[in-house]
Amino acid sequence: MAKWRSIVIGAMLLLITSVGAGAASAADHSVIEPALIRVAELSASDAQLKTHFDYLSRNGNSTCSRAFMESIASMPDDVRLQGSCCSPMSFHRYSEQLEGLKNYDQIAEIPSNPYDVPAGIAKRLLAYYDLELTAEEEEAYDYAMKNSDEKGPCCCPCWRWNTYGGLGKFLIRNHGFTGQQVAEVWDLSDGCGGEGDHVH
């Protein structure tokens, strides 16, 4: 009897130890597993958004040179083109841009963060830059050029100009966007930095 009691007690202790270890393992996993956060879904009050802004504003890796634009073709698709083009980033404007771009989440080709663009998307959009538009489509594109804040896809001829110029043509051709709609997307996607034309 004593022998069986020892066996039963031992088995119970082993079970308790296993359950405890499993719980601890699960707890550890929940702690160390990084949360998958889409920055575009955060609001300006979120600490993660401010942290991401601070990183992008201090660690930009893109330049306005033609050499940089040409190098995009050989980059892995998951490389991020980060930081502003010409002026320091503004958190106020940054948060407004991300909020406005949420309205275009259903179109995968519109980057959700103009200061953190995957190279894979940039490659696809650059290919559209040389697309020949019909006369009607060209009217829409010309309207966007004349009425966007930067009078074009960006403030200077660079990888952003060609990338977002390609995006404009893609949206006109594939989604029937008007010139006004393209201009709105360009304004929200302005990666030049600064407050834009609407300080408030």
Image: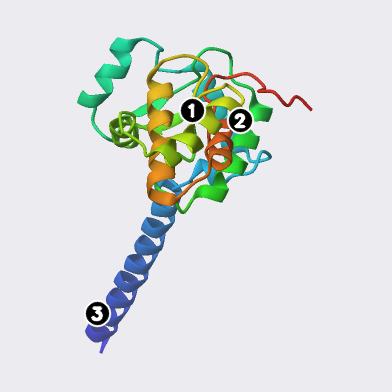
| Local crowd size for mark 2, using a 10 Å CA cut-off: few (<14), some (14–19), many (≥20) | many
Q: Which residue, given by chain and number where applicable, does mark 3 sit on?
A: 7
Q: Is residue 108 left or right of residue 46?
A: left
- Which dot, 3 or 2, sits closer to the camera? 2
Q: Amino acid at mark 1?
A: Tyr
Q: Amino acid at mark 2?
A: Tyr
Distance in Å between CA atoms under marks 3 and 1: 64 Å
* Res. 110 in view: no
Please tell me whether mark 2 sits on a helix, a strand or a loop. helix
- Which dot, 3 or 1, sits closer to the camera? 1
Mark sitting earlier along the chain (3/1): 3
Image quarter in which the N terminus is found: bottom left
Please tell me whether mark 3 sits on a helix, a strand or a loop. helix
Q: Nearer the viewer, residue 72 or 1?
A: 72
Label ID, residue 115: 1
Image vertical order of residue 45 relative to residue 126, above or below: below
Discs 1, 2 touching: Cβ within 8 Å = yes
Chosen colour scheme: rainbow
Mark sitting earlier along the chain (1/2): 2
Image quarter in which the C terminus is found: top right
Please tell me whether mark 1 sits on a helix, a strand or a loop. loop
Q: Is residue 63 left or right of residue 84?
A: left
Label ID, residue 94: 2
Q: Is residue 92 left or right of residue 68?
A: right
Q: Could you say where residue 136 lies in the image, as x and y percent from the top left?
A: 45, 41
Q: Residue at x 43, y 40 (%)?
A: 137
Q: Could you say where residue 187 lies in the image, as x and y percent from the top left?
A: 58, 31
Q: Amino acid at mark 3?
A: Ile
